[in-house]
Amino acid sequence: MNSVRRVDFQPYDPEFAADPYPTYRRLREDSPIFYSPDFGLTFFTRYADIVKLLADKRVGRSMDPVLTPEELADRHRVEDRDGLPTYDRFVRSNLLETEGPQHARLRRLLSKTFGPRRIGALRGRIQELVDGLLEQLIPRGQMEFMEELAVPLPVYVISELLGWPVEERHRLRPWSAAIVKLYEKDHNRMDEARAEAATAEFADMLTQLVNERRKAPAGDLISALVQVESDGDQLSHDELIASCMLLLNAGHEATVNAAGNSMLALLRHPDQLEQLKANRGLLPTAIEEMLRYDSPLHFFHRYVLQNFEYEGFEFSKGDTIGYLYGSANRDPEAFENADQLDIARDPNRHVAFGRGVHFCIGAPLARLELEVLFSTLLRRIPGLQLADQEPEYNTGLVFRGLKRLQLCW
């Protein structure tokens, strides 16, 4: 058997944040499967390997289904879960973090409430929200795209979807930012304290709303989740709270990053932007291409659920492996001219939303928001251009997104 090559992988460096793709290219060519001592896991960089392993039942998002009670208790002690009791209760037990029958059950229940009909019905309201935000911005001739458009839009959409009080929606973005910070390896104790506090406050507010909807159901998602049933089965209180948090944290954060990355990609490729202006019918394929070209989510980890061999490498039960989605989506073995933005690319089997049983349940909503946002921008601000040629990215490996994006017209 071969030994996995050790590589010094530093994704939190500002240079990597500015442009990770040359690093990904070198890794695919020289060390497509490598071990990082800093992360304590084995990374996969190539599209074919990642797609294959995403369908492999020998790996999963949680070890829980294959551990004895004693092993599970030991694992929780090692991960110091007692230090984050509320975070562990609601964030580590959602659909994204479960496996096997538990995951299938949760997905079945959520799919009954968060399906195409509910999402499609949001189109008109998303259009109103985009128009309302632009009404305030257009007369100024400039905007900070992230804070003034990319961030508030998904917050407003998620809050309306859930049935969140308008006067309380300003709390959602800070809560989400604090919670998802723990997805990144470079968090510290202060970040943990903030995430725990945000989770507790979010859970308290959701519990209040859930109790109100039990007494007086409305037409929102919280009411639907309270009432949903499948073969006599319903969501527990904790599952309901965890599901709402997931919709905010995963869906909102990814959509913010996708909007910013996509806007920048279009403006840096004026030929593609002009092609899209000339043919608005390309918008669906353009959105898929922008998601591939600079994906909002670059990394997800999995646990090895049983010993197995892959491509000459041995993996043991309990090992952690990581999929570099950002690298896979630029793999020239999977995409012709992978480093070029081609808004007419079709087919486009990117992994920006994952693949298989853990495919992002919020992907249709993200696509709808992006479609409405970009179709409206193309129509109402055709002269949109970069005001700052060197936008700054946040450092991170899981989420890839911009700090700021200054635009003018």
Image: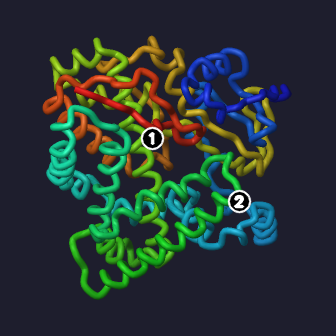
**Residue ID at (41%, 51%):** 251
Residue nearest the observer in this picture, 20 or 286: 20
**Residue ID at (61%, 22%):** 24
- The answer to whether residue 250 is left or right of residue 225 is right
Residue 280, image quadrant:
top left
**Dot 2: element:** helix
Quarter of the image with the N terminus is top right
**Residue ID at (66%, 16%):** 26
| Dot 1 amino acid type | Phe
Distance, label 1 to label 2, CA atoms, is: 30 Å
Q: Residues within 10 Å of mark 1 (few under 14, many from 20)?
A: many
Residue nearest the observer in this picture, 150 or 160: 150
Q: In this view, does 231 lie above or below 38?
A: below
Specify the farthest residue to the bottom: 215
Residue nearest the observer in this picture, 152 or 39: 152
| Dot 2 amino acid type | Arg
**Residue ID at (78%, 42%):** 40
- In percent of width and height, residue 105 lies at 47, 65
**Dot 1: element:** loop
Quarter of the image with the C terminus is top left
Q: Identify the residue position indicated by label 2 in the image.
A: 189
Q: Identify the residue position indicated by label 1 in the image.
A: 353
- In percent of width and height, residue 2 lies at 84, 26
Number of numbered labels in the structure image: 2
